[in-house]
């Protein structure tokens, strides 16, 4: 038996079969959800409005969303990665982000788990200008100067890395 999940893919919709084992795994994650020192905030599916795709990788897709009338980024684990190890890694990433507090590090609001739909996602602070690499090397980089823009960005990145490297245990990026 498999569950069928509707996924938006650009302008078309397609169905993805989600094994019952993955659904059972997500349900068990709800029961045992602990993210280190802080418990993960499990968000209700209704709180997040999924919208346009912001980016996609081999592990997850990031979509624009809304949480309590605030724009957010929603990093949703791909259906084909709903195995115990991938969910464990995803939860560990969420736990790490929940433990960090720095103005130059993305904040995590919590997890969005929909076991009936075989979905798990992380709700993150939205960077309104998009990914840093796109800002620095894409068409939007025109007009950026070191004096007015890039020096401040470089200092922010350096501060974030110093913060991460100062954690115990050490966090490498």
Image (cartoon, rainbow, N blue to C red):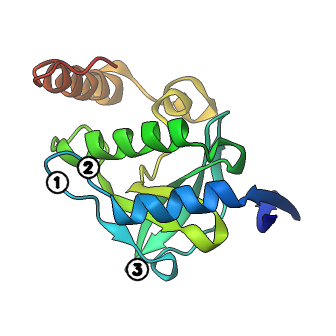
Q: Residues within 10 Å of mark 2 (few under 14, many from 20)?
A: some
**Quadrant where the N terminus lies?**
bottom right
Where is 170 relative to 35, above or below?
above
Position of residue 32 measured from the top left corner of the image (x, y, whole percent): 33, 58
Report the Cα–Cα distance between label 3 and label 2.
26 Å
Q: Residue at x 22, y 28 (%)?
A: 160
Please tell me which residue lies in front, 150 or 24: 24
Please tell me which residue lies in front, 40 or 54: 40
Which mark, by number, is residue 69?
3
Position of residue 143 measured from the top left corner of the image (x, y, whole percent): 49, 31
Q: Residue at x 16, y 41 (%)?
A: 102
Q: In front: mark 3 or mark 1?
A: 1
**Quadrant where the C terminus lies?**
top left
Q: Which residue is mark 1?
A: 38
Horizontal side of residue 140 vs 41, given as left or right: right
Give residue 134's quadrant in the image: top right
Which mark, by number, is residue 35?
2
Instruction: For the residues labelled 2 and 1, say whether their Cβ atoms are less than 8 Å apart.
Output: yes
Q: In front: mark 3 or mark 2?
A: 2
**Element under label 2?**
loop
Position of residue 107 measured from the top left corner of the image (x, y, whole percent): 29, 50
Q: Residue at x 33, y 30 (%)?
A: 149
């Amino acid at each position: 038996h498999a569950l069928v999940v509707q996924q938006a893919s650009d302008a078309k919709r397609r169905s993805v079969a989600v094994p019952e084992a993955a659904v059972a795994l997500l349900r068990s994650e709800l029961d045992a959800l602990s993210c280190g020192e802080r418990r993960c905030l499990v968000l209700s599916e209704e709180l997040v409005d999924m919208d346009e795709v912001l980016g996609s990788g081999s592990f997850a897709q990031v979509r624009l969303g809304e949480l309590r009338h605030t724009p957010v980024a929603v990093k949703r684990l791909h259906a084909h990665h709903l195995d115990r190890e991938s969910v464990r890694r995803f939860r560990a990433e969420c736990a790490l982000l929940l433990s960090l507090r720095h103005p130059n590090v993305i904040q995590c609001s919590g997890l969005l788990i929909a076991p009936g739909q075989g979905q798990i996602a992380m709700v993150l602070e939205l960077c309104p200008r998009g990914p840093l690499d796109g800002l620095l090397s894409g068409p939007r980089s025109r007009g950026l100067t070191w004096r007015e823009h890039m020096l401040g960005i470089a200092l922010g990145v350096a501060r974030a890395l110093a913060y991460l490297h100062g954690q115990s245990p050490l966090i490498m990026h």
